[in-house]
Image: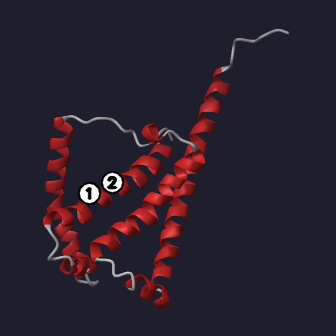
Amino acid sequence: NKTNYFIPAYKILSNKRSEVMKNAKRAMIFFILLLSFNYLAGRILNIPQVADLIASWNLSMAEYLIATQVIFILFPCLLYFVFTRENMAETLSLRGFSFKELFIAVIIGLLSQPVAWFYSYLSSLFFENQVVLVLDAMFDYPLWLLLLVIAVVPSIVEEIAFRGIVLHGFKNL
């Protein structure tokens, strides 16, 4: 038995490329399934009998918004980690951040507001602004609850699903 310690470079590159493509395929399948699941869930929630059933639970707007994000986005993400057995910390790139990074993120958020307002105004010329209707319904909520519903929960859930799972799958592509 002669052991060959020399592995040709093309085999190493081929194996690495195969792993990268496998990760990208897994991320794309997750993304398509997540979109399909959310589309079907939206259609099901609009069935009058289902809407009446949910209305009978007497959920506040805040509870409803948080529940839908957890059920329709966060839960599929957790299932992804269960079935793929990927390392959650590695996939989500969990690491600390510096004060400088936090400051830059806040500045970017503040500077992007005029652009968001412009697009909101532009789209309101053609479509009814559903966000305003939801915010009007939550007008009497305390500030901490508004921040939780509008900023904290959506950003965490979105980061896990898209920057975490999907972007990680396409990282080395």
**Measured along the vertical axis of the image, is residue 134 above or below residue 172?**
below
In percent of width and height, residue 47 lies at: 49, 87
**Label 1: how many Cα within 10 Å (few below 14, some 14–19, many 20+):** few
Q: Secondary structure at mark 2?
A: helix
Residue 55: image quadrant is bottom left
Q: Is residue 133 left or right of residue 165?
A: left
Q: CA distance from mark 2 to mark 1?
A: 6 Å
Residue 156, which numbered label?
2
Q: Is residue 170 visible?
A: no
Q: Is residue 100 left or right of residue 78?
A: left
The residue furthest top is 2
Which quarter of the figure is the N terminus placed in?
Answer: top right
Q: Is residue 97 left or right of residue 38?
A: left
The residue furthest right is 1
Q: Is residue 67 left or right of residue 120?
A: right
Residue 152, which numbered label?
1
In percent of width and height, residue 54 lies at: 42, 82
Q: What residue is rendered at 43% in x and 58% in y?
A: 74
Give the camera-side residue of 95 and 57. Answer: 57
Way the structure is coloured: secondary structure
Q: What residue is rendered at 54% in x and 62% in y?
A: 32
